[in-house]
Image (cartoon, helix red, strand yellow):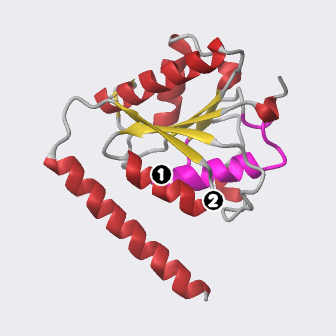
Amino acid sequence: MPIQTRPIIAVLGSTVQGGRPNPALHSRLDTAVQEWRTATGVGLEPVVFCLGGIGSEGAEAEAPVMARYLEQTGIPRRCLVEETHSRTTEENLRHLAAILASPDYPDAWVGKSAEEAPDPTVLPQEVATDGLPPITLVTSRPHLPRALLMAKSIGLDPRGVAAPVHTITLKSLVREVGALAIWGARSLRRAIAGS
């Protein structure tokens, strides 16, 4: 199958601790593995995007940790993309769209480590999304509605898959509502500035 027609699974990062996924990220990665195995079971070989930069000062980038974990589960390196330049969910998704729209995709990114791949921040961040493949977007259940809304607003065609969480706390729900409000305000400000 030509690589350009391969399905896309995009896993949104979460915190890593000591080079290992935290429980939320572990759940997201295990869900992505299930999605990948389902696709390979019907003869497809998806590309899995590990979307996660450095969340806080001095913290470890998430994407390389995610890729190592996925390789240990049997997903070959030739199926992985590491995107380490994003700091927010919106940046994760904008960089994903920019990479998919790049004339250098897939050769410059698929199967490469973050150090080997180009920096997606130098690509146009507002891209024509016509012709981009649909994506399977994997994240935690509380985060999924906001992530899907952002992906659609960018012009991506997402199918959301919620990774199980052991508990949904009031703190996580408040965080999502707050993050959605901040993103909405930024989007409105951009729309007003652009008109």
Classed neighbour count for the residue bearing mark 1: other residues with Cα under 10 Å, few (<14), some (14–19), many (≥20): many
**Residue 50, x across and y down, in percent:** 55, 34
Q: Is residue 12 left or right of residue 74?
A: left
Q: Residue furthest left?
A: 170
User: Mark 1 sits on what residue?
Assistant: 148
**Residue 61: in sight, yes or no?**
no
Horizontal side, residue 55 vs residue 11: left or right: left
Residue at point 64%, 56% (across, down): 121
Q: Where, by quadrant of the figure, is residue 6 drawn? A: top right
Q: Which residue is mark 2?
A: 155
Q: Position of residue 77 (x, y in %)?
A: 66, 19
Label 2 Cα crowd, 10 Å radius (few <14 / some 14-19 / many 20+)? some
Is residue 90 on the magenta stretch? yes
- Tell me the residue at 57%/46% (across/down): 158
Q: Which residues are magenta?
A: 84-109
Q: How many marks?
A: 2
Q: Position of residue 81 (x, y in %)?
A: 64, 33
Q: Looking at this rendering, what residue extends furthest in the front direction?
A: 42
Q: Is residue 131 left or right of residue 20?
A: right
Kind of residue indicated by mark 2: Gly
Where disc 2 sits, the SS reads: loop
